[in-house]
């Protein structure tokens, strides 16, 4: 369920300041969102995968914390990011 190198590089290029910008909050949220979407697809077909479900909840919690941080520090970037990623709030 890990993202491919190409997909990861594409997300970093889209949301980061440059190709090396992997630590910014926007990039981290975008990468977590992609991982969450992949894992959600997996869990739809494998309903009894309890460890996968636990991992999904863990990723969602990490993303939630980063979204809260972004919301506190840069509200405009937060609103723009959730609309680009299609995250409900």
Image (cartoon, rainbow, N blue to C red):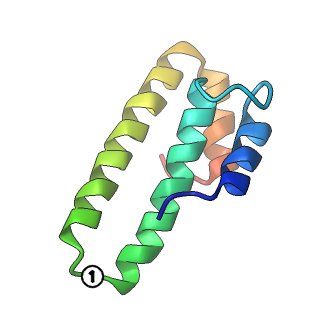
Left or right: where does residue 22 sit relative to residue 53? right
Tell me where residue 57 appears, x and y as whole percent: 28, 53
Left or right: where does residue 4 sit relative to residue 49? right
Furthest residue to the top? 73
Tell me where residue 43 appears, x and y as whole percent: 36, 75
In percent of the image, x 64 and y 50: which residue is there? 85
Closer to us: 2 or 29: 2
Tell me where residue 21 appears, x and y as whole percent: 69, 25
Give the secondary structure at mark 1: loop
Q: How crowded is mark 1: few (under 14 residues within 10 Å), some or many (20 or more)?
A: few
Furthest residue to the bottom? 45
Determine which residue is flagged by label 1: 47
Closer to us: 73 or 35: 35
Residue 34 position (above or below residue 61): below
In percent of the image, x 78 and y 32: which residue is there? 19
Closer to us: 18 or 64: 18
Question: Which quadrant of the figure has residue 15?
Answer: top right
Left or right: where does residue 30 sit relative to residue 17? left
Question: Which quadrant of the figure has residue 55?
Answer: bottom left
In percent of the image, x 47 and y 46: which residue is there? 89
In percent of the image, x 66 and y 46: which residue is there? 83
């Amino acid at each position: 369920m890990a993202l491919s190198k190409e997909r990861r590089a594409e997300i970093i290029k889209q949301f980061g300041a440059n190709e090396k910008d992997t630590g910014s909050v926007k990039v981290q949220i975008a990468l977590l969102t992609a991982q969450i979407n992949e894992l959600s697809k997996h869990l739809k077909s494998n309903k009894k995968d309890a460890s996968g479900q636990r991992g999904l909840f863990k990723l969602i919690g990490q993303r939630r914390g980063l979204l809260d941080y972004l919301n506190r520090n840069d509200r405009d970037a937060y609103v723009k990011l959730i609309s680009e990623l299609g995250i409900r709030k």
